[in-house]
Image (cartoon, rainbow, N blue to C red):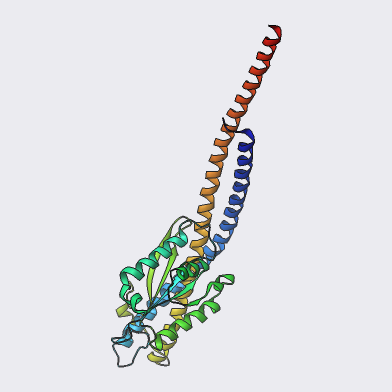
Amino acid sequence: MANLKAIRVRLSSVKSTRQITSAMKMVAAAKLRKAQDAIVQLRPYADKLNEIQAGLSAALRDTETENIYAERKKGSGKVLLVVVTSNKGLCGAFNANVLRETRRIMSEKYGDLVKRGDLAVITVGKKAHDSLRKLKCNIIADHSDLYTGLTFDRVAALADRLMQHYVTKEYDTIEIVYNQFRNAAIQNLTDEVYLPVTMNVSGGAAAAPADYIYEPDQVSIVSELIPKTLRIKLYRALLDSFAAEHGARMTAMHQATDNATDLIRDLTLQYNKARQASITNQLLEVVSGAEALNG
């Protein structure tokens, strides 16, 4: 039978762990509410802006004016991956899924580029930076500090640098790998093309340009609208990941709390059985001693 003291020590440890996981669950739930409100409010605006931008870009494509953000026929072929994770752990498979998908992209989709050294990585989140650094990936920048104050202005600065990388033809493709927030329990692993600008939107965007009157002119509007759309697109991706992180952490801490509760119940039962056996042994010793004295 297990030692009573050992069971008491373990029982006390599990109870302390349950208090910690329960507190972390409540903190994650409070942060999730704020992050969820932010991404839900941004999505309609981002979707409509993307729809307008795609329609205007399609109209610009039909003219002789060059769209510097469109796909290039000839280029260096270099690719830049923006990998978005969290700075902290204890959020289930949230980070592991992104890192697994990143490794898959590197090996299956861009294996030749990795061998030639034509694939670079920008990390947002300490988990991505630490993991990919161990794999000796070509990390050109780390922006884990964005999470200390996730604002549009700070994200826009990163978006401008990404656009500069593309406009200067340093990279021909820029992709973002992140978790898209669906609800507190579900995150959609996403790999989307950030640049070049694509025209794949629903609702027949090709007909959109006929509905607009351009002032001062079409080229000026598009040159202002596309960068703004790209800034919003990156900001949306980071807000999605931020909300998904807190949802994953809340779910993970909820499961950990439930597991601790089950373990406490099992340890309590084990402790009661051990204590009952100990009392029974003590009674047997007393009875045996009394019989020996009477004999």
What residue lies at 61% left-to-right and 51% top-to-bottom? 20
Residue 93 falls left or right of residue 278: left
Q: Is residue 128 above or below residue 13?
A: below
In the figure, 162 relative to 286: above or below?
below
Residue in the image at 32% along x and 75% along y: 200
Figure check: 102 above or below 255: below
Q: Is residue 224 above or below residue 107?
A: below
Q: Picture coordinates of residue 100 (x, y %)?
A: 40, 63
Q: Position of residue 233 (x, y in %)?
A: 44, 75
56 or 212, which lies in front? 56
Left or right: 285 in relation to 80 = right
Is residue 194 rendered to the left or right of residue 5?
left
Which quadrant of the figure contains the N terminus?
A: top right
Q: Is residue 42 visible?
A: no
Point out the image quarter for the C terminus: top right
Question: Does residue 166 appear in the picture of this structure?
Answer: yes
Q: Quadrant of residue 261?
A: top right
Q: Closest to the observer: 118 or 213?
A: 118
Q: Position of residue 115 (x, y in %)?
A: 34, 76
Name which quarter of the figure residue 153 lies in. bottom right
Q: How many marks?
A: 0
* Residue at the farthest right position: 293
> At 50% across and 68% down in the image, what residue appears?
130
